[in-house]
Image (cartoon, rainbow, N blue to C red):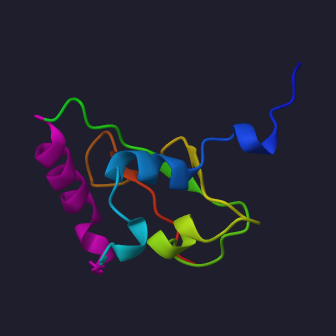
């Protein structure tokens, strides 16, 4: 079996640069907002509704091997020794009192 070289991994920075084209990523302005854990399922449902008419939207999982803090755009652009790579989305089952749990995107905060 052929071993994948480090350069063959899909880097998050490459995907971002392709998405934004000629715009300089270093000039992006970002913001964050914290919601209570109890709103998690409602947020997931709202996101699904928001994107249901946009079938061409592709969600990507972003992962770092040694990431021990909340991932930011700055981490995606400035980590040559621990680059963020594109990988599968991660979900968690959240109990909502129904027969089936809700499936929510997972975000690890450390």
Residue 38 on the magenta span: yes
* Residue under the image location 68 percent in, 41 percent down: 9
The reply, left or right, for residue 89 in relation to residue 85 is left
Q: Quadrant of the C terminus?
A: bottom right
* Residue 50 x, y percent position in the rendering: 12, 48
Of 38 and 61, nearer the camera is: 61
Camera-nearest residue between 39 and 56: 56
- Residue 27 location (% of width, % of height): 35, 75
Q: Is residue 90 visible?
A: no
The residue lying furthest to the front in this view is 22
Residue 16 percent coordinates (x, y): 43, 53
The one of 108 and 102 positioned closer to us in this rendering: 108
Nearer to me, 58 or 18? 18
Q: Is residue 74 above or below residue 64?
A: below
Region of the chain picked out in magenta, as a range: 31-53
Q: Magenta stretch: dominant SS?
A: helix
Image position of 18 with respect to 72: above or below: above
Please give left or right for residue 13 compared with residue 99 in the image.
right
- The residue shown at (40%, 66%) is 25
Q: Residue at x 41, y 45 (%)?
A: 18
Which residue appears at 30% of the width and 40% of the height?
99
The N terminus sits in image quarter: top right
Label total for image: 0
- Residue 23 is at least partly visible in this image: yes
Residue 11 vertical placement versus 41 (above, below): above
Task: Find out whether residue 35 is within the magenta segment.
Answer: yes
Q: Is residue 66 left or right of residue 10?
A: right
């Amino acid at each position: 079996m052929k071993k994948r070289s480090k350069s063959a991994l899909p880097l998050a920075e490459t995907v971002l640069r392709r998405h934004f084209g000629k715009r300089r990523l270093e000039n992006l302005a970002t913001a964050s907002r914290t919601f209570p854990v109890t709103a998690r399922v409602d947020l997931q449902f709202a996101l699904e509704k928001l994107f249901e008419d946009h079938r061409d939207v592709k969600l990507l999982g972003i992962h770092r091997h040694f990431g021990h803090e909340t991932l930011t755009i700055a981490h995606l652009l400035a980590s040559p020794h621990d680059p963020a790579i594109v990988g599968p989305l991660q979900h968690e089952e959240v109990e909502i009192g129904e027969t089936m749990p809700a499936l929510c995107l997972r975000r690890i905060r450390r």
